[in-house]
Image: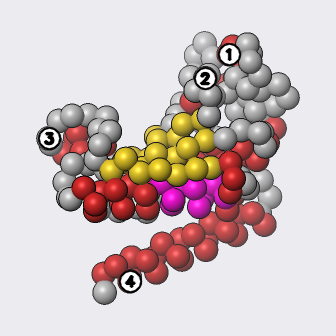
Amino acid sequence: MRKLVFAAFVAVFLAGCSTQQTQPEAPIDDKSAAGAPGTGGAATSGLGSGGVAGAGAGAGAPGAGAANPLRDPNSVLSKRSVFFDFDSFVVKDEFRPLIEAHARYLQQNRNARMTVQGNTDERGSREYNIALGQRRADAIKRMMTLIGAQDAQVETVSFGKEKPRDPGHDEAAWAQNRRGDIVYSGE
């Protein structure tokens, strides 16, 4: 019964996300770069077209250096991990701007491809964790495609508990391991 209620919650959440497409596009506020001293140029610290920092013409071109928003530490696109609660694949509200930024980047760069890697902490069986990691990766992909990324641009894979970020055996380590990682092709 708990799983049915949880599945219904996820369906309602995702249905709510789909209404985002009909609303006017709002810029994404990257609080880590906004107003930070020494951030300088508007192309890297400001919001480019479509609300993605630095995603204007030429972004991501080879040799672009700091103009590439995927590598610019002041860009929201340089952040690549979405963290989850224990035994959950529901994307937290705090990670929605990150997913929206990556989805808009994919929408503006139709040749870009990524893999979302689902990960879990060490608790639970191998099979359970592989399935949970896949659901986490799929939840991130679903949000991206609802925002405007093409299905073919985003692949998903689950590593379960096989790729821990933190090898510890406490809650702090487990919290770092319950995540979905965004990896662009060619990186």
Residue at 28% across / 47% down in the picture? 161
Residue under circle 1? 66
Q: Earlier in the sequence, mark 1 or mark 4?
A: 4
Disc number for residue 168: none
Q: Earlier in the sequence, mark 3 or mark 4?
A: 4
Residue under circle 2? 71
Residue at 66% across / 41% down in the picture? 113
Can residue 176 be spotted in the picture? no
- Residue 87 position within the rendered picture, expressed as x and y whole percent measured from the top left: 29, 62
| Image quarter in which the N terminus is found | bottom left
Q: Hey, what amino acid is under mark 4?
A: Leu
Report the Cα–Cα distance between label 2 and label 1.
7 Å
Q: Are marks 1 and 4 in contact (CB under 8 Å)?
A: no
Residue 28 part of the magenta-drawn span: no
Residue at 55% across / 44% down in the picture? 115
Report the Cα–Cα distance between label 2 and label 3.
31 Å
Q: Hey, what amino acid is under mark 2?
A: Arg
